Amino acid sequence: MVLLGSITEAKDYVSVYRKYLKDKNTRIRALALRELNEANREDLLGFKDEIEEMLSEPDMKVKQAAINILKRL
């Protein structure tokens, strides 16, 4: 997942990053959210509810990454 962000635009892999929002590992979820922060607003609006659900995460990195995206929406 890290390599995807370094070689392509995040918008090209929104569906891949979105899948990782359900990962069991909090580091993976936080990384997916950080990468999704680079996607365009219209793509993110399609699953705003999923991003809002991340606000109830116990991990602060996940929560902060979700907040950063929601600020843009």
Image: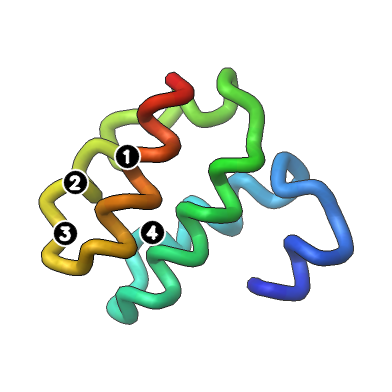
Spot occupied by residue 41 in the image (x, y as percentages of width and height): 57, 22
Numbered label attached to residue 55 = 2
68 vs 3: above or below: above
What residue sits 16% from the left and 59% below the top?
57
- Amino acid beneath label 1: Ile
| Residue that label 3 marks | 57
Image quarter in which the C terminus is found: top left
Quarter-wise, where is residue 39 in the image?
Answer: top right
Q: Residues within 10 Å of mark 2 (few under 14, many from 20)?
A: some
* Circles 1 and 2: CB atoms closer than 8 Å: yes
Q: CA distance from mark 1 to mark 4?
A: 14 Å
What residue sits 11% from the left and 51% below the top?
56
- Amino acid beneath label 2: Leu
* Circles 1 and 4: CB atoms closer than 8 Å: no
What residue sits 44% from the left and 36% below the top?
69
50 vs 59: above or below: above
Q: Earlier in the sequence, mark 3 or mark 1?
A: 3
Q: Secondary structure at mark 2?
A: helix
- Amino acid beneath label 4: Leu
Q: Earlier in the sequence, mark 3 or mark 4?
A: 4
Q: CA distance from mark 4 to mark 2?
A: 12 Å
| Residue that label 4 marks | 21
Q: Residues within 10 Å of mark 4 (few under 14, many from 20)?
A: many
Q: Earlier in the sequence, mark 1 or mark 4?
A: 4
Q: CA distance from mark 3 to mark 1?
A: 11 Å
Q: Earlier in the sequence, mark 4 or mark 2?
A: 4
Spot occupied by residue 65 in the image (x, y as percentages of width and height): 39, 51
Q: CA distance from mark 1 to mark 2?
A: 7 Å
Numbered label attached to residue 67 = 1
Numbered label attached to residue 26 = none
